[in-house]
Structure formats: C-alpha cells, structure tokens
Image (cartoon, grey):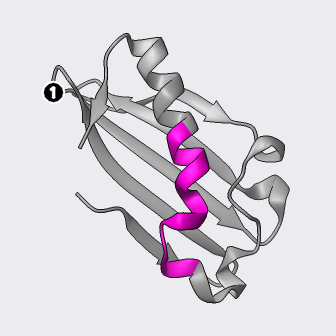
Amino acid sequence: MNPDISKSSQGVKFLELLKTEQGRPVRIRIESDAYANQSSAVIELFDGDKWNEVWRIPAGSMETPAGLYARREWKSAVPFRADRAELIAKAERILGEDITR
C-alpha cells in the first residue's frame, strides 16, 4: 500500500500500513504540525484487537519538518522518509523480524 498523506489546517499526516515477515499488521503514523513540539512519529503493531505502540520518535528528534502544511511538497512522502526509516529499523530490532509492504 502506498502511504496516505492528508492535510489539515495546521498539519500533515502520513499513514502507512505494512506487515511483519510473519504477516502481523504494522502501522506507521507521522504528523508534521505547525508547532514542532506537537509533531509525532510512531510505529504500531496490531494484536488482533487494538494497535500497540512499538516505538516513538520524540518530537524534538524528528527529521520531518514542522509546518509542512504550508509547503508545496506536503503531498510528497519524501519529507517523511528519514523518520519512516528510523521507525522501521527500531521496530525490526524490537520485534525481531523484518517489516515489508
């Protein structure tokens, strides 16, 4: 699945659904807010009932720029690339299995 990128009045949300090599659903959610401290990047694993956080990048450590909603490239997955890669790498180490499309 290609990521879903949507815009609100003060933010841009990136949502992507992936799977572990064992077929367990994984969700990446990254939000670029107008204010850096309100941005977020999290990867979650679905246990059959609910999504559970596996790893979160603290807002101050994110590479995705704040205020992306006001930029022309808000529709592109490129600004989210570094945080996406970090979330996947951390989750693969924690879960002990690869994450794929």
Q: Residues within 10 Å of mark 1 (few under 14, many from 20)?
A: few
The type of residue carrying mark 1 is Gly
Where are the magenta residues, as a range? Answer: 74-85
Q: Residue 46 at x, y = what percent?
A: 30, 30
Instruction: Report the side of 57 relative to 15 (left or right).
Output: right
Foreground residue among 63 and 46:
63
> Which secondary structure dominates the residues rendered in magenta?
helix
| In the depicted structure, whether residue 81 falls above or below residue 34 | above
| In the depicted structure, whether residue 30 falls above or below residue 91 | below
Q: Secondary structure at mark 1?
A: loop
Please tell me whether residue 78 belongs to the stretch shown in magenta: yes
Please tell me whether residue 32 belongs to the stretch shown in magenta: no
At 37% from the left and 42% from the top, the residue drawn is: 27
Q: Residue 22 at x, y = what percent?
A: 17, 19
Q: Residue 86 at x, y = what percent?
A: 57, 36
At 83% from the left and 53% from the top, the residue drawn is: 37
At 61% from the left and 59% from the top, the residue drawn is: 31
Q: Residue 97 at x, y = what percent?
A: 31, 16
Query: Which quarter of the rendered picture does the N terminus lie within?
Result: bottom left
Task: Identify the residue under disc 1.
Answer: 23
